[in-house]
Image: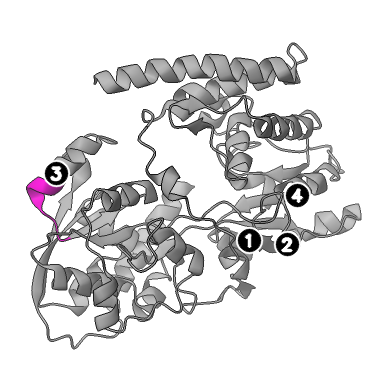
Amino acid sequence: MKTRKWIAVALTLIVLLTGCSPGNSEEEDSGAFKLLSSFDKSTFNVLYGGSLFEQTHPTYEVAYVNSSERIPPADWDAYLELLELEKPDVIAISGVSDYYRLVSAGLLLDLSPMIRKDSFDLDTYEPSVLEILKYPGETTELFGLSPFFDPSALYYNKTLFEKSGIPLPESGMTWTEMLQAAARIPNKGEDGRPIYGYHHRAFSTPAYYMDYFASVEGLSMIEGTRLAFDKPEWRSITERLLQVFSEGKVSFAAKDEDIRFDDPEANGEAPFLEGRVAMMSAGAALIAELNNGQAPFEWGIVSRPVSIDRSKSIPAFPSPIYAIRRDADNAEAAWQFIAYMNQTATLKQLSKSVSQLPSRTDVGTERYGRSLAPFYDSLTVPPSLTEVNKPAQFPPFFMSQTLFPIINREMSAVLGGSQSLDAMMKTLQSEGQAALDAAMTQFEAN
C-alpha cells in the first residue's frame, strides 16, 4: 500500500514538473552551485521537487552529490570529510540534530543578511518551524530554511464518540486527558471485534508509547551517557500506560516482531478506517484516504495532545533543511535556490504532490474541505543550548534494537503479573545502563 502511494506521488510530481512552472520563469540571472543531499538527483526531485528550480532557472547549473553513496550512515566524521572534499554550496540536511551540529561547528552561513537584502518574507512561516530553525541561544541569526514539515494531529471517530455518549475530543487536551477519554470507549463493537480508544498507527510497541508520551513532556530516555528511568516522572508515565494497556484501551504489539510482520491491530490505518478506533495520531495525508470514502463514519481532527502543564507538545520537525556552507564559492546562487524553494508560489505547486505540509501558512488552509489548523496549532518548545551541546551521541539504532526490546520484555512481564512496576523500573535502569555502556564502548572503539 505504501509502495502504491509513493508511486502515485512520484507520477503526480513528474507531471507537475514537466507541465507547470510557477512564477519567476523570466529569471535572467545565471549561476552554478553544488547541492549535497542524502538522495540521488531523481529521488530528490521526486520527494522535494528540486527540478522546479532548474525548469524555471534554465541558466543555472546544479550539480548533485549523494552522500548515501559515498559514506556509511550515521558516520559523522565521514560526513565532515565529505563536506571538505566536495565543498557543496547548498546542503540539504535531513534532520534537525545534524543541522544543529553543523551550526555548532561553524560550518553554515548565516542567511539573515540575504533575507534582509532581498526582503524575503518570513511573516507567513509557521512559528514553530522558525523556532526550531533558530539555533538555541541565537536571536538574530538563521542558518537554514525548510519548505516542509511533517506535523501530526489527532483524528477521531465522531460517530463512535457520540454513540458511546462521550464528549468529543478538543484541541489542547493533555495526553493524560486523551487517554482518559480513550479509557471510556467500549472494548468491543456489536460485531464482537475489538475497539480501541487510541491507536498510534505505526511502531506501536509499549516502548514506543513510552518514548512518545515522554517526549510530549520533554523527557528523554537517555541523558548524555546515562539512562533516566530512575527519575519519578518515568514511573508515573509508565504506570499510566500500563493501566490502558491492561484494559485493552490502546492498540499495541507486545514485541517488535509483531510490528515487523505488519500486525494490523498495531500498525497501519486499517483499524481506524474500519471504525474500530476512537482516536489516532496521523499526518495530513490521512485526510485524502478518509475523503475517498474509505471511512464509514463521521470524523474530525483536533491538535495533537500537549504536556500535562499544557506548555508544550511534540515538535514537528522540518525536513529537508536547506543551508549554505560557510565558505561556499557560489553563495549567491545557493541563496537563489533556497529562496525559490521556500517561496509561497513554489510551495503551492509542490504541496499538490509532496505529502508533508508546507512551512508557510499562506499556501493553503484546507484539504478536501477540512481545515489544516490542527496541524499548525503547535506548542513546540525548541531544545535548549545545553541539550544541543551535549557531547554524548549514543550509537545508531541503540534505542530501537537494544533498549526498546528490553522495555517491551519488562512491560510484558508486568502485564502478565510476574513482575511489579517498581522492579521493572529498576531493571530498565540497571540492565539498560549496562547495555548502553557496552554499546558506547563498542561505538567509540570503531
Marker disc for residue 299: 2
Marker disc for residue 79: none
Q: Nearer the viewer, residue 308 or 180?
A: 308
Helix, strand or loop at mark 2: strand
Hey, what amino acid is under mark 4? Answer: Met
Rendering coords of residue 124 (x, y %): 46, 78
Q: Check disc 4 and report the residue beneath it.
A: 178
Helix, strand or loop at mark 4: helix
Q: Is residue 272 left or right of residue 27?
A: right
Applied colour scheme? one colour
Picture quadrant where residue 239 is located: top right
Circle nearer the N terminus (4, 1): 4
Hey, what amino acid is under mark 3? Answer: Leu
**Which residues make up the magenta segment?**
83-89
Q: Is residue 221 left or right of residue 332?
A: right
Q: Check disc 1 and report the residue beneath it.
A: 290
Q: Nearer the viewer, mark 2 or mark 4?
A: 4
Q: Residues within 10 Å of mark 2 (few under 14, many from 20)?
A: some
Question: Looking at the image, do the residues carrying marks 4 and 1 touch, with CB atoms under 8 Å apart?
Answer: no
Circle nearer the N terminus (2, 3): 3
Which residue: 43% across, 66% down?
A: 130
